[in-house]
Image: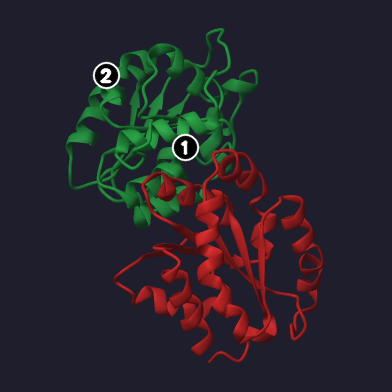
Amino acid sequence: MNRFDLLNKIQNILRDNLVICNIGLPSQELYKINDQPNFFYMLGSMGLSSSIGLGLSLSQTKQVISIDGDGSVLMNMNTLATIGNRAPSNYTLLIIDNGSYGSTGDQRTFTDENTSLKDVALGAGCKKVIECSGEETLNELSKAIEDKNNSYVIISKINSGNVKIDPIPLNPITIRDRFRKFIGIVKYL
Amino acid sequence: MKISKKIIDNLKKGGVDFYLSVPCKLLANMIDILENDKDVYYSAVPREEEGMGICAGAFLGNKFPCIMMQNTGIGNSVNAIVSLLQLYQMPVVFLISYRGTPGEPVGAQGGMAKITEDILETLRIPMLHCSSENDLDKITTFSKHAKVIESPVAILCDFNLMKDDT
């Protein structure tokens, strides 16, 4: 199972929640699979999907799923400490861990060598940390969303590999405003 | 404490209701005030760039965020400012303790101080430079301006303004 297969498999649960999606191929694949106004596609700022989702979950009550990658979490690893100390129960971080920098040509990341993001997350203070296969991810994500008392970090171990895909045609303000309209903030659209 | 209280009061009057900080001793009083304020959210964060991401999410969730940091934090955050906050036109107030300005005892702070305003100018971020207590009266209007122009703005508080605020 690669990232595209995984996003396909979990699309129904994503559709019902606020989703922050990582820059590059993850956003492009999600857009192609099933574009929704409640998907915030990152067009820049690699590393910050987990942080954007955290700020969103602290600011309103709907469930938030941050879709991140192993390379991106390695770039902003302090985020796990902030999540471990501050994440509210409406927050889930889904790290799609394929051991590679998928958007830049599948160069290996350190999770393909010695680094365990599960161990890092636990050490950083995250309480509910699940490492699972791609096949198990839908079930684990469902359980995390249904649990109203805890935030979760789910590390989905999948294979590297990408599908050929186009850049997202939406401009950033469109992404911003339709997302905020879905939450009920923007009224003018 | 008087200066710090005035800064926070004026930010709150401008609608700012979500605060993060990467601590600085010049921000310590403001952090104390915010930690005891039940009307607003406050948390420390480990790194400014990460804080920019959290502020972006808070804006999406209808908060008006402020990140408090030393001017060194701008250096840590340039890409997040440009390709997140500015790309999506998100209002965020940067409240910056301007280390390395006259009165600063640590010589090494001078390097970032020399280029802080150049960086902010290059980023086209509006600046409010506070060197006296009277300047603090402009904070409320300046914060509201961030929402009007849908852009980050920067408030720079000089070392000498903050150092005796005990």
Q: On screen, A11 above or below B128?
A: above
Q: Which is closer to the viewer, label 2 or label 1? A: 2
The chain shown in red is which?
A: B
Q: Are marks 2 and 1 on the same chain?
A: yes
- Identify the element where label 2 is drawn: helix
> Is residue A60 among the parts visible in the rendering?
yes
Colour given to chain A in the rendered image: green
Quadrant for the C terminus of chain A, please: top left
Disc 1 element: loop
Q: Position of residue A74 (x, y in %)?
A: 55, 39
Dot 2 corresponds to which residue? A12
Residue B59: give its label: none
Q: Determine the residue positioned at 71% across, 50% down.
A: B123
Identify the subunit bearing mark 2.
Answer: A
Q: In the displayed image of the protein, which residue is found farthest to the top?
A: A164
Say whether residue A1 is visible: no
User: In terms of image quadrants, where is residue B139?
Assistant: bottom right
- The reply, left or right, for residue A173 in relation to residue B125 is left
Q: Chain of mark 1?
A: A
- Circle 1 Cα neighbour tier, 10 Å, few/some/many (<14 / 14–19 / ≥20): some
Q: Which residue is mark 1?
A: A116
Rendered view: A31 above or below B44: above
| Alpha carbons under labels 2 and 1: distance apart | 29 Å
Q: Earlier in the sequence, mark 2 or mark 1?
A: 2
Q: Residues within 10 Å of mark 2 (few under 14, many from 20)?
A: few
What is the x, y in percent for residue A176? 46, 35
Name the amino acid, label 2: Asn
